Every structure is written in C-alpha cells, then in structure tokens.
C-alpha cells in the first residue's frame, strides 16, 4: 500500500490518509531531516544560503507538508485510531526539535555563515 503522505502532492490527499500512514511518514521525514542536517554540517564552511539554509528549509517543508494534514485531520475528523497515531508522533517531533535546536555543529554553521563574506550579500527581508 502506498503511503499518500510520502507521495508528492500539491494539495493534501485528506481522503486517502489513514491512521496507519501517520507514524511511518513522520518517522521517515524526521530521519530525512536529521540526515540532511548532518550532511549540510559535514560539508564545512564556507556556508551560504544555498548550501546551508535552503536544504534545511526544504526538508523542514516536507516535514510540515506531512504533519500539517495529519494535525488538521486530528482536529476536524478525530478518531481513536488517528488520535493514537497523532499522539505517537508528538514525542518524536519534540525530540527532533530539541535535537536540532541544540545541534552544536548546526549552530556553528549558522555562526560561520553570519561571520562569512556571503552574509553581506543576503537580503534582510
């Protein structure tokens, strides 16, 4: 069975999302986010928007595109099965958020970007 949350979509496929899709999709997205953070940090300086910020924003967007429909469904079409799947993902998301927020290498990469020559070329918007 194909997981609709892991298939690219323009609009969320709400009618196809089942509780059993939630945990595998969120877990995969979180693993992809972690791998991307490690890959981006490992490349080393000089950091730019294109090789630091953009790749991280892209995987975070994928995570949001997976979790937002799940969260919405949990709010408007709640069921015991969906609620259980949704609640299983919350600690995973919290743990990832803590991990990325305290990632020393990522902090140093952003600091290197700020201190580097490329920073002056970034738009303040």
Image: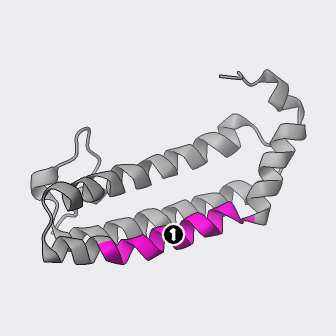
Q: Where in the figure is residue 43, as x and y percent of width and height?
A: 76, 54
> Which secondary structure class fits the magenta region best?
helix
Q: Is residue 78 left or right of residue 49?
A: left
Quadrant containing the C terminus is top right
Which residue is rendered at x = 34% and y = 78% of the image?
88
Q: Which residues are magenta?
A: 87-103
Q: Residues within 10 Å of mark 1 (few under 14, many from 20)?
A: few
Quadrant containing the N terminus is bottom left
Which residue corresponds to mark 1? 94
Q: Is residue 99 above or below residue 69?
A: below
Q: Where in the figure is residue 118, as x and y percent of width and height?
A: 82, 30
Q: Secondary structure at mark 1?
A: helix
Q: Is residue 111 above or below residue 100?
A: above
Which residue is rendered at x = 22% and y = 40% of the image?
11
Which residue is rendered at x = 81% and y = 41% of the image?
113
Q: Residue 12: say if magenta.
A: no
Q: Residue 101: say if magenta.
A: yes
Q: Is residue 107 above or below residue 49?
A: below
Q: Where in the figure is residue 76, as x and y percent of width and height?
A: 16, 55
């Amino acid at each position: 069975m194909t997981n609709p949350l892991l298939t690219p979509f323009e609009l969320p496929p709400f009618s196809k999302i089942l509780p059993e899709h939630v945990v595998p999709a969120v877990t995969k997205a979180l693993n992809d986010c972690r791998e991307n953070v490690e890959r981006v940090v490992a490349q080393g300086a000089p950091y730019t928007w294109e090789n630091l910020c953009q790749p991280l924003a892209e995987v975070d967007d994928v995570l949001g595109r997976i979790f937002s429909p799940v969260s919405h469904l949990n709010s408007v079409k709640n069921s015991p099965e969906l609620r259980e799947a949704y609640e299983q993902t919350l600690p995973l998301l919290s743990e990832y958020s803590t991990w990325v927020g305290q990632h020393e290498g990522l902090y140093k990469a952003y600091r290197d970007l700020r201190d580097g020559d490329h920073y002056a070329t970034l738009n303040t918007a």
